[in-house]
Image (cartoon, coloured by chain):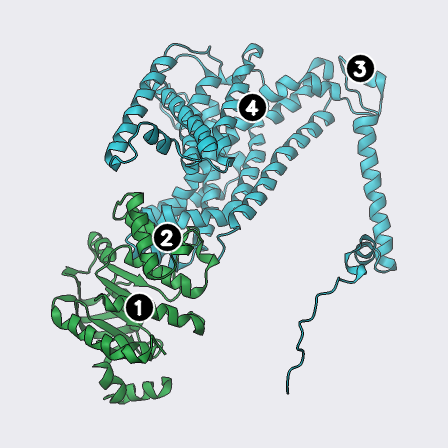
Chain colours: A green, B cyan
Amino acid sequence: MLQGENNMSDQQSLGQLASAASSEVMIEINQMNKWYGQFHVLKDINLTVHKGERIVICGPSGSGKSTLIRCINALEEHQEGDIIVDGIVLGKNLKNLDHIRTEVGMVFQNFNLFPHLTILENLTLGPMWVRKMGRAEANEIAMQYLERVKIPEQADKYPGQMSGGQQQRVAIARSLCMSPKIMLFDEPTSALDPEMIKEVLDVMVDLADTGMTMIVVTHEMGFARTIADEVIFMDEGDIVETNKPADFFGNPEHERTQKFLSQIL
Amino acid sequence: MGIVKAEKTPARVAPIFETSVVGWLRKNLFSNTFNTILTFITLYIIYLTISGVFTWGYVDATFVADNRRECYDNSLTGACWAGVIDWFDNIFYGRYPRDQIWRINFGGLLLALWMAPMWMGPVKGKVLIGISVVAFYPFLAGYLFSGGDKGMFMQVMIALALVAFIINMANMVIGLSNKQSLRQFLIRVLGQSTAPDKTQRNILLILAVAAFGAAFFWQSGWGVEGVSWTKWGGLFLTLVISGIGIASALPGGIILALGRRSKLPVLRVLSTGFIEVFRSVPLITVLFMATTMFPLFMPEGFVLNKLVQVIIAVVLFNACYMAETVRAGLQAIPKGQFEGAHTIGLGYWGTMGLIIMPQALKHMIPNIVGSFIGLLKDTTLVSIIGLFDILGMLRSISKDQPWLGLHKEPLVFGAILFFIICFSMSKYSRHLEVKLSAGSRH
């Protein structure tokens, strides 16, 4: 399904090496609660992510998994508890929010590329306007990341002229241009045609190999099995189960997890 | 089941009745008896109208005469264009001193030159050109039109405008010949292409300051005689009022729309209130308020000239309409665009200026141009409060001794003039819409 199952074990061991190498905490969430009006979306969430760790979050729709990662880069406000990202406490302080957003990259289901700008402009916008880089330097970095997602020849096209898979790879490159410490993926392959899913997952696997801290909300179980250090199952706002991928898929503990897995596998 | 067709089917030519003129006529005009009758009746009506207008306006018309009596001597049923032709200068320039009319024409030429680069493909920095027109041209033109003594502020603004104009023209020439921006060209000529950004910026800054000094020195050496605003009139006045209206309604509308969508309650309530008040009142009321009521609230001795009051009223009124147009455009932008901008760390102004506004404005072009056309036509209302804009001028022809009672022809002429201006605006907006949507659609 992915990148050839045969090198799966290599990547897993590499991942464990990376996470074992550093135990620096990147994200810490303590007793976090969030409501939409009266609706209790996230209930007593506790989560710790170390540097270089790859976390996959799965669960039925409406379980709050997207909301959780949107809270981590402050796209959504939480009402109770603490979220600490790279040593910075998220709260009402606007300066902190802007700072967090430059440290945390995010990739969306619908890409959210800027349709009025070319691919290259999409990529250089952040470095030039937020990081105050010169154009030449920003272009160089952008081209470097376009090489990495394997579409350097598309630099002068507009997003509307590309396939979904290519757009999503551009979106990943756009986030990487800001050299974030953490990458969040919110169902990156859900809006794609089946034949394009692989090219995006390949890029994400490559990224995982570089030791990037990643939190991925996805239904791609093959991907989770290959790269995840830990799989989290959420249902109705609760984190129901956290396990190593091998245990999570081979021997799920909670009955809700078992039911979910029996439905999607 | 097996293979149904092994070979590809070649495409054939469409049936003749789908493509020929006769086929089109039969399908659209003569499809049955009733439609055929309708077609003939309509053609007859069109014939009557056109032949009537043509006979009145051209065949029987008088183009050369000294007064209305001579027109009648020539033909009783035809139009008397001689009156309109006799008043041409008044219609276009009002009572502006005849020997100073070149200033108006020169001002118009400057504007055309200033804006021309925006339509030239290889020229760089079009947004900056647009901003410089709105920010600097009004001061230069304002002085050119009204003349008199220059205050310190005006001197500085005129010098800035001159520098902006010269930079713009140089940029145009470089763009057309070298396909480069002026900045790149200067840096290359000075051999500083490899210098760090900061050095390059300093060099350019020094050049700009030097240019400003030269312009300031040069402009202090000349002046033009003063012409009171009461002498302004005709199409010139109409274009001045609507031009300022158009140039400031859009920025004003953007600010008000952002205010109305702001998260800060005070700002939101103020903007909303302002917009709703102006939108619920007819323009003519606003104009009367501005010219008759407003001075009553002002301290004794504070006199603002009527033209300025009218312009302020037109600007505020249209900014409020524009604000609603802009708001509609902003609402059409998907939430994902805001989120995408936030995740690369752009703040509020970065998000709005770089991501949201460019897309929203593009969607809104037809509506914006629609408002501009409305603004241009609404400007004629100022003739009611005693300014001699083009409509005021056209109507005073009938009170002029030789042309007493000549109503019809001036108004027809005015209608044709407005049609030409407004129709070209709307055609251009259509063209812009097609051009901008090419290549960058989803």
Viewer-closest of B291 and A59: A59
Q: CA distance from mark 2 to mark 4?
A: 44 Å
The residue labelled by disc 1 is A204
- Graded by Cα atoms within 10 Å as few (under 14), some (14 to 19) or many (20 or more), the crowding at tag 2 reads many
**Which callout, 3 or 4, points to the residue nearer the camera?**
4
User: Could you give the CA–CA distance between mark 1 and mark 4, rounded to whole angstroms?
Assistant: 63 Å
Nearer to us in this view, B321 or B117: B117
- A36 relative position to B78: left or right: left
Q: Amino acid at mark 2?
A: Asn
**Amino acid type assigned to the residue bearing label 1 in the image:** Met
Q: Mark 4 = which residue?
A: B236
Relative to B394, B134 lies left or right? left
User: The numbered mark 4 sits on a residue in which chain?
Assistant: B
C-alpha separation, residue under disc 2 versus residue under disc 3: 71 Å
Which residue is the site of mark 2? A122
Q: Name the residue beneath numbered marker 3.
A: B69
Is disc 4 on the same chain as disc 3? yes
Disc 2 with disc 3 on a shared chain: no
Q: Report if the CB atoms under discs 1 and 4 are less than 8 Å apart.
A: no
Above or below, B287 relative to B342 = above
Distance, label 3 to label 1, CA atoms, is 89 Å
**x then y, percent, for residue A111:** 38, 62
Looking at the rendered structure, the kind of residue marked 4 is: Phe
Binning the other alpha carbons within 10 Å of mark 1 as few (below 14), some (14 to 19) or many (20 upward) gives many
Q: Nearer the viewer, mark 2 or mark 1?
A: 1
Quarter of the image containing the N terminus of chain B? bottom right
Looking at the rendered structure, whether the residues under marks 2 and 4 are on a common chain is answered as no
Give the camera-side residue of B81 and B195.
B195
Q: Label 1: chain? A: A
Give x and y (percent) for residue B165.
42, 25
Task: Residue at 27% x, 32% y: name it.
Answer: B200
**Chain holding disc 2:** A
